[in-house]
Amino acid sequence: MKNYIRVILGAKNIFAKECYEGNFIGADYGIEQDLTDELPENWRDFNAKFREIWLKKHPGKSKVAAGLACGMLWTVCKGINMGDIVICPDGLGKYYVGEVTSQYHYHPGANLPHQRSVKWYPEQIDRAAMSQELKNSTGSTGTTAYITSYANEIESLIGNNKPPVIISTDPSVENVSEFALEKHLEDFLVKNWKQTDLGKHYNIYEIDGEIIGQQFPSDTGPIDILAISKDKTTLLVVELKKGRVSDNVVGQIQRYMGYVKEELAEPNQEVKGVIIGLEDDIRIKRALAVTTNIDFYRYQIIFKLHKS
């Protein structure tokens, strides 16, 4: 199955033109060694080894930052498959688009030494031509972002003219229209975080002033929002659901919380969870009654017209 991945080529896209002219994508992250024999199938195994190496090279940084850096590096080197389509901002309002044509190779001394060869398409995508949803997804933080759910739109923008329908290749997404709405709600919550009750006590996780806590990667899927208390003692996992919330979301958020506790939390930090939905029912109330570290919040949508 072909995936579509947005890849940032250096801070503020500084190496985008170099990668385009050299027919490759790449990453750095300060790991100065050939990773050819160091790329397991599971990125968690890669993180387990290289997280401590990264932290030694970046003293004072958190385990969250280390986990994110190593996860992104593994994705560029291993997680992206040959035949996948990469979309890379050029820093000037457009995106290079190309097909990955090689496995990992190492180029010591290069600006981005961990590389994959790419056959670039002659067409670029103008950001102004994207739907707002695709703009939001391609504008997300982190080196890589999977945007396969927008495959049809991307193909249309580069001239293949497939019908503009909402699709998803994620088998866990049962209703793609509801999935799209959940993404709208997530973006709205992030933009208005400081005005919410949660925003009074928590900040969405940032590194060097950049929000990285939205769609934070874990080994069981992306966390909608990862936040940290203002006193740095608590990590908060937020799971957002459109409409009525089923009790199976409790197991889902517990998996995310387990990952955060085991892989990201410092020894002095606790982990809590919040489920946000439009409605709850007796099943989720019963499930949460014996779960002391997960809260449920209802959101409310208000739409008004005012005659001028």
Image: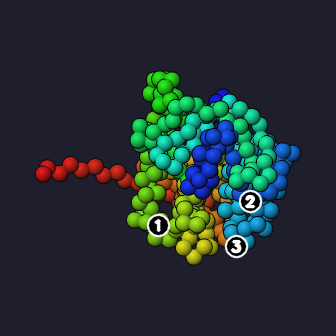
> Please, is residue 225 above or below residue 103 in the view?
below
Q: Which mark is residue 124?
A: none
Residue 47 spot, x, y in % from top left: 77, 54
Q: For the residues marked 1 and 2, what is the alpha-carbon distance in whole angstroms?
A: 33 Å
Location of residue 307 in the rendering, given as x and y in whole percent from the top left corner = 14, 49
In front: 59, or 68? 59
Q: Position of residue 114 (x, y in %)?
A: 75, 48
The residue that appears at 51% across and 23% down in the rendered structure is: 160
Disc 2: which residue: 30
Answer left or right for 65 relative to 244: right
- Residue 138 in the image: above or below residue 64: above
Instruction: In this rendered view, identify the residue nearer to me: 166 or 258.
Output: 166
Any part of residue 33 in sight: yes
Q: Amino acid at mark 2?
A: Gly
Q: Secondary structure at mark 1?
A: helix
Please state the total of marks drawn on the protein image.
3
Q: Nearer the viewer, mark 3 or mark 1?
A: 3
Q: Residues within 10 Å of mark 3 (few under 14, many from 20)?
A: few
Residue located beneath label 1 in the image: 199
